[in-house]
Image: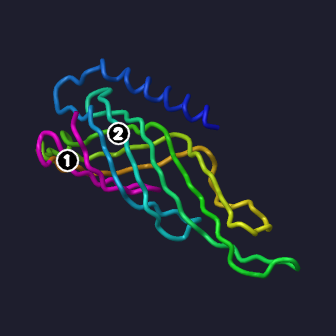
Amino acid sequence: MTKIIIITVAFLVAFSLTGISQTQTGGEKYGKTLNLGVGIGYYRYIGNSTPVFHANLEFDVARNFTLAPFITYFSYQKYRYWGNNNNDYKNYYYRQTTIPIGLKGTYYFDSFLGATSKWDFYLAGSLGFAYRTIRWEEGYEGNIKVSNGTSGLYLDGHIGVEYHINQRVGLLLDISTGISTFCLAVYL
């Protein structure tokens, strides 16, 4: 699985870098931006929010459009009540860690909305793979399958706004269908 993740990331980075040579014709450039963020993820199958750490690197591809390879990390703990003749009935915990890796495509609506250079407004979509691990508490011998309705494929839709503090730094709020983050944007 690690080899698949490494190959996928290498492919996505190489694909994104091809966009560097394609410059936008007029208008603001959005690429060459490192977005580092923390946030919350809320998933129906978890039943509560969980902290998320996120990073992506945006590159201009076309006018008002960027691609950004990304990596995200989140982990949560849940409990399952179990026991048998040899083990006392109690709540056993498991910890699931998920690391989505992929490519985010973003379209900026600044010119359409008439936004000033201090603000960016966008819609985006993320596509990638989610690497998951689940670790059970020692002593648990029940069903170890966690049915959370997810697969290795990672899809997420985004709507966001960014405020440019100055020419080097901005603050970004990204609200999405799975993971919403508050990011620090660093313009390279």
> In the image, residue 116 lies at what x, y percent?
11, 45
Residue type at numbered disc 1:
Gly
For the residue pair 174 and 165, the one nearer the viewer reads as 165
Q: Residue at x 43, y 57 (%)?
A: 52
Give the quadrant of the N terminus.
top right
Q: Nearer the viewer, mark 2 or mark 1?
A: 1
Residue type at numbered disc 2:
Thr
Which picture quadrant has residue 56? top left
Q: Which mark is residue 170?
A: 1
Q: Which mark is residue 106?
A: 2
* Residue 188 versus residue 155 in the image, above or below: above
Secondary structure under the numbered disc 1 in the rendered image: strand
Read off the magenta span. 165-188
* Residue 83 versus residue 124 in the image, above or below: below
Q: What secondary structure is the magenta-colored segment mainly?
A: strand
* Residue 65 versus residue 113 in the image, above or below: above
Secondary structure under the numbered disc 2 in the rendered image: strand
- Is 179 magenta? The answer is yes
For the residue pair 15 and 88, the one nearer the viewer reads as 88
Q: How many marks?
A: 2
176 relative position to 27: left or right: right
